[in-house]
Amino acid sequence: MTTYANITSIHPSTAAQPSTSTEARNASPKLRITRRGRIVFGALASVLVAGALALGAMLAAPGAIASDELSATEFSYVLAQTGDSLWSIAQELDPAADTRDVVAEISRLNQLSSAGLQAGEAIAVPLRFAESDRAFSASEVGL
């Protein structure tokens, strides 16, 4: 009895290539990111970067130091009379300056949200107006 063997050689270049289209899809899956996916990943990266920056700023910022010392800063005051407004007081204190700037400075110093004044109200004025005829110190009145 005689046996024959049929031997064929397989080339590596043809063995690695799939023979059908379904095998081609399963053999090399490719990840494709859609436009919505890019937006989501971009937003996620932005949030992470913003959080890292906020954390860095929070850790790098100096804290306020509280003490039980009284401040030695003393202000001069102007007593508001009937019919007075911040505008009229600012014009009287410094007629040569821009009245809007003086009003803004007085408002900021007194933390006023409106320009309305009541008669008898003591309004703090910047120290450069301490020599004004209308200005007085807090110790003179007992404020």
Image (cartoon, helix red, strand yellow):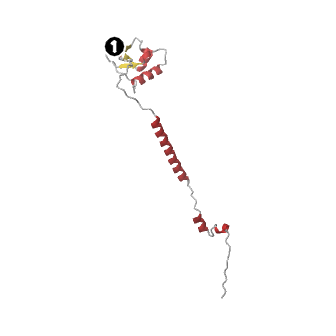
| Vertical side of 45 occupied by 90: above or below | above
Q: Residues within 10 Å of mark 1 (few under 14, many from 20)?
A: few
Q: To which quarter of the image does residue 110 belong?
A: top left
- Which residue appears at 53% of the width and 53% of the height? 37
Q: Is residue 121 above or below residue 37?
A: above
Quadrant containing the N terminus in the rendered view = bottom right
Q: Amino acid at mark 1?
A: Glu
- From the top left corner, tell me how far across and down residue 94 is, in percent: 46, 15
Which residue is at 68% across, 73% downward? Answer: 9
Q: Quadrant of residue 18?
A: bottom right
Closest to the observer, 36 or 50: 50
Question: Seen in the image, is 45 located left or right of residue 2?
Answer: left
94 is higher (above) or lower (below) than 57: above
Question: Which residue corresponds to the image point at 64% horizontal and 69% vertical from the top-left?
Answer: 15
Number of marks in the image?
A: 1
User: In the image, residue 5 lies at what x, y percent?
Assistant: 66, 80
Q: Position of residue 65 (x, y in %)?
A: 40, 29
Instruction: Pick the residue in front: 6 or 103.
Output: 6
Q: Residue furthest bottom?
A: 1
Residue 23 percent across, percent down from the top left: 59, 68
SS state under label 1: helix
Quarter holding the C terminus?
Answer: top left
Residue lying at the far left of the rendered structure: 142
Q: Which residue is mark 1?
A: 140
